[in-house]
């Protein structure tokens, strides 16, 4: 592979280009008209404009991207995350054009893109799954029967869904019919596929996901877990690796299950297997994401492995250069997603220009970002400005470094999730490790940030007063001494 095209923008485009450069591979960036001056465009060796800002006129134009790639003699396409990354048809068209798709096969993407197909694929592999059904259901009478069998509350999910879209909790049988109709119509309009199924609702789970790597020669390993329970409306904000609660035995068990999930769809490349972990530490397979994930850096920090390099090597048909036993966890890493969103105002997008943008620096501090001072955050795409990642030899150390880095990060011109991060990394529920996916709902409110700021302001005022008084105490005896001296002087 001599030249790759990165079919993406922002931080992930830069992230991929950096590794490609390090590997001596030429890079081609693509961009929309609003991204003309974006750093990923300058960082690449060549760049191609795809069209106007809206994604469906630029970053989602698979055929245009492939055409440009062919014209420029590209031999690999990295899709990043989002956009075309989990589009089986795009992966197929890339391969058909004689270009390597730096990701799994269309077959793997297709299976894992459907929750029902995924359940079906892993059936033979003895993977723990939430009690429920593994077929699409439309009949309310049958749904009532299933609800009675597995017990309420139950959860209706869309087979084509993702990120919680089309999910409905049903507390009791009398609500089932109404909720099922809504779920089906929501799934139909959102995904063009009204298939829904039913699962027992796990009430306060933790979200644990396992990173896997598989080559094209039958070798599959896992790179331990990430915990992503701190979310709001299915959008992750804080992630860490390893999880604060997994024992080595449970980690091995979940890792082995994740490897089997990958094998069930003949997976190749980097992928992530998502699990729910309940209060009793039972785990259940949820779904597999067939892309490099946003939060992959925390895994890189604790394993020392560059996941993008591995993706490229695998796409070049190389063998994995390590086995499961060669891998181990070094320390702890935490990540905060810095979004252009206002945590004091329901996390609404905060539109504006980065009037000031100064990154934190230091050992074990990593910033993956896609913007520079003076740039505007376009409204057309995901509002993530950056990912702030810190590493420490212990969880406490990683968190401590994160708190310092958050304070060093200077972003002016728009509101960000930095104050929210400050809140989370200081919160006893987070620092103790005793939290679940309801953390934000259970513990966060704008008032709490205000209270915290007020308490800190008071603390600062008290400290200032204390030092002022101390100074006075030092000065006062000097005066007394002075006068005594003067007095003595008079006497002589
Ligand atoms: C669940 C669940 C409880 N019980 N399934 C949300 C997104 C999708 N990937 C699956 N999700 C969930 N599935 C059962 N049977 C709770 C969630 C869930 C959740 C999962 C992971 C992280 C955050 C979450 C927030 C709300 C609900």
Image (cartoon, rainbow, N blue to C red):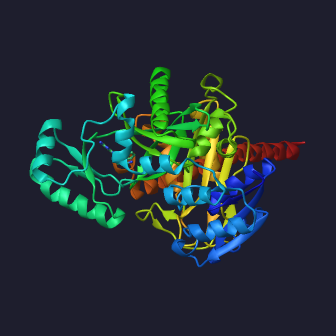
Across and down, in percent, residue 25 comes to: 78, 52
Q: Is residue 301 above or below residue 36?
A: above
Across and down, in percent, residue 233 comes to: 38, 56
Please give left or right for residue 190 compared with residue 337 in the image. Answer: left
Front in this rendered view, residue 398 or 54: 54
Across and down, in percent, residue 166 comes to: 31, 57
Front in this rendered view, residue 374 or 193: 193
**Which residue shows up at 46% across the image and 60% down it?**
343
Across and down, in percent, residue 41 comes to: 72, 67
Quadrant housing residue 43: bottom right
Quadrant housing residue 324: top right
Q: Is residue 307 visible?
A: yes
**Which residue shows up at 57% across the image and 32% down it?**
220
Please give left or right for residue 64 compared with residue 185 in the image. Answer: right
Q: How many marks?
A: 0
Q: Quadrant of the C terminus?
A: top right
Please give left or right for residue 452 compared with residue 470 in the image. Answer: left
Q: Is residue 12 above or below residue 29?
A: above
Q: Is residue 438 visible?
A: no
Quadrant housing residue 219: top right
Front in this rendered view, residue 385 or 407: 385
């Amino acid at each position: 592979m001599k030249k790759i095209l990165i079919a993406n923008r922002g931080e992930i485009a830069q992230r991929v280009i950096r590794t490609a450069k390090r590997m001596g591979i030429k890079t081609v960036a693509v961009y929309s008209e609003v991204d003309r001056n974006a750093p990923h465009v300058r960082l690449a060796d060549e760049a191609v404009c795809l069209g106007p800002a809206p994604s469906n006129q630029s970053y989602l134009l698979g055929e245009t991207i492939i055409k440009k790639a062919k014209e420029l003699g590209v031999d690999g396409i990295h899709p990043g995350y989002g956009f075309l990354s989990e589009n089986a048809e795009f992966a197929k068209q890339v391969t058909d054009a004689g270009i390597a798709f730096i990701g799994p096969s269309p077959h793997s993407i297709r299976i894992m893109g459907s929750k029902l197909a995924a359940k079906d694929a892993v059936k033979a592999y003895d993977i723990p799954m939430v009690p429920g059904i593994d077929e699409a259901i439309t009949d309310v009478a049958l749904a009532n029967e299933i609800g009675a069998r597995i017990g309420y509350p139950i959860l209706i999910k869309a087979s084509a869904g993702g990120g919680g879209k089309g999910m409905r909790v049903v507390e009791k049988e009398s609500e089932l019919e109404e909720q099922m109709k809504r779920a089906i119509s929501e799934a139909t309009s959102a995904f063009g596929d009204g298939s829904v199924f039913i699962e027992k609702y796990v009430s306060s789970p933790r979200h644990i996901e396992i990173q896997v790597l598989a080559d094209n020669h039958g070798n599959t390993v896992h790179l331990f877990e990430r915990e992503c329970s701190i979310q709001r409306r299915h959008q992750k904000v804080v992630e860490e690796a390893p999880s604060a609660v997994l024992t080595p035995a449970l980690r091995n068990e979940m890792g082995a299950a994740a490897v089997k999930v990958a094998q069930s769809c003949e997976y190749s490349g980097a992928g992530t297997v998502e699990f729910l972990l309940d209060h009793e530490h039972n785990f259940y397979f949820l779904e597999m994401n067939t892309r490099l994930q946003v939060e992959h850096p925390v895994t890189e920090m604790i394993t020392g492995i560059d996941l993008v390099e591995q993706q490229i090597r695998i796409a070049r048909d190389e063998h994995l250069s390590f086995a499961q036993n060669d891998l181990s966890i070094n320390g702890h890493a935490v990540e905060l997603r810095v979004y252009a969103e206002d945590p004091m105002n329901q996390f609404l997008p905060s539109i504006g220009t980065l009037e000031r943008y100064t990154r934190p620096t230091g050992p074990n501090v990593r910033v993956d970002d896609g913007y520079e001072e003076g740039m505007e955050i376009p409204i057309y795409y995901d509002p993530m400005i950056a990912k702030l990642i810190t590493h420490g030899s212990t969880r406490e150390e990683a968190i401590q470094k994160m708190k310092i880095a958050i304070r060093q990060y200077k972003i002016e011109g728009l509101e960000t999730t930095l104050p929210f991060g400050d809140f989370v990394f200081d919160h006893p529920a987070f620092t103790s490790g005793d939290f679940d996916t309801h953390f934000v709902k259970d513990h966060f409110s704008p008032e709490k940030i205000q209270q915290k700021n007020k308490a800190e302001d008071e603390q600062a005022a008290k400290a200032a007063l204390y030092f002022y008084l101390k100074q006075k105490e030092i000065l006062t005896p000097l005066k007394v001494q002075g006068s005594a001296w003067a007095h003595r002087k008079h006497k002589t």
